[in-house]
Amino acid sequence: MNATAPSARKILLINGHPDPRPDRLCSALASAYAEGAQAAGHQVRRIEVGALAWPPITSQTDFMAPAVAEVADVQAAVTEADHLVLIYPLWLGAPPAAFKAFLEQVFRYGVALAAPGEAKGVKGLLAGRSARVVVTMGMPGFVFRLVFFAHGLKCVSRGLLWISGYRPVREMALGPVESPNPAQRLRWLARMRRLGAAAA
């Protein structure tokens, strides 16, 4: 990695695909983003959700309880990062269950939002940070937005990140990923490298 530049940002890059194999598109997109960011002097920490074995939260008591050490480490990375990048596939119109379980473990009260009774209304605790959400899917991106209103993206970008204080929250919907067009894949990877270099 290059020496840290004065304008370097701390980036937390999360591959939310339950299958962490490097040949998966989500993994390749994450690698391309990381390459661009590191080449530009940004600090990057990458987390593979598919390599974790965290149990799901099943009750309000679980959600309100202090996080175990492994989860707390990721929570600290979230609060320390200037920029958050989430990459995941669309499964049955929504984020995969393993990725959703990861988000529920990490973005608890006290990290993302003030606990009930600690603030009037909803108070996000992650202001001053930016984020990007990248979703891959089997359908064209414009169909996802026009027909399905991008629900599987908005539930993360607005239902979690925006409400937690992230500004701006930028979105990308990439598809169809099953297309055998290698040129399109190369364009997506090149775009991710450029975004990484800009920490955008």
Image (cartoon, rainbow, N blue to C red):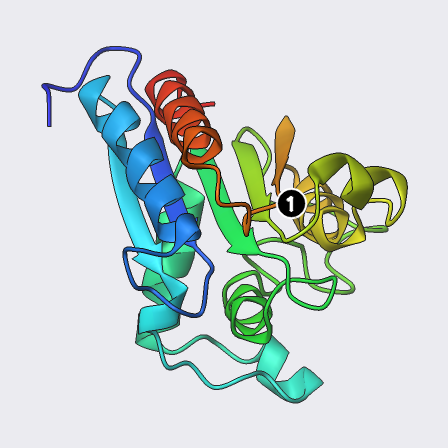
- Placement of 94 over or under 144, stated as above or below: below
**Taking 53 as reference, is 144 left or right?**
right
Q: Residue at x 31, y 34 (%)?
A: 32
> Residue 130's x, y, as percent?
54, 30
Left or right of residue 116: residue 37:
left
Circle 1 Cα neighbour tier, 10 Å, few/some/many (<14 / 14–19 / ≥20): many
Q: Residue furthest top?
A: 6
Look at the image and tell me whether residue 183 can be seen.
yes
The location of residue 117, given as percent across then percent down, is: 78, 63
Residue 120 locus on image (x, y percent): 84, 50
From the top left corner, tell me how far across and down residue 195 is, in percent: 43, 22
Compared to residue 53, the image places residue 158 above or below, namely above
Which residue sits at x=30%, y=49%?
A: 46
Residue depicted at x 31% and y 71% = 51
Q: Nearer the viewer, residue 138 or 92?
A: 138
Q: Quadrant of residue 45?
A: top left
Task: Using the image as rendered, state which of residue 136 and residue 129 is in the foreground.
Answer: 136
The one of 52 and 78 positioned closer to us in this rendering? 52
186, above or below 178, in the image: above
Q: Which residue is mark 1?
A: 161
Question: Given the current orientation, which residue lies at the most extreme right position?
Answer: 147
Q: Secondary structure at mark 1?
A: helix
> Which quarter of the rendering shows the N terminus?
top left
Q: Is residue 167 visible in the rendered structure shown here?
A: no
- Label count reads 1
Looking at this view, is 96 or 167 the one in front?
96
Q: Is residue 21 above or below residue 121?
A: below
Q: Amino acid at mark 1?
A: Leu
Tell whether 184 sits left or right of 29. right
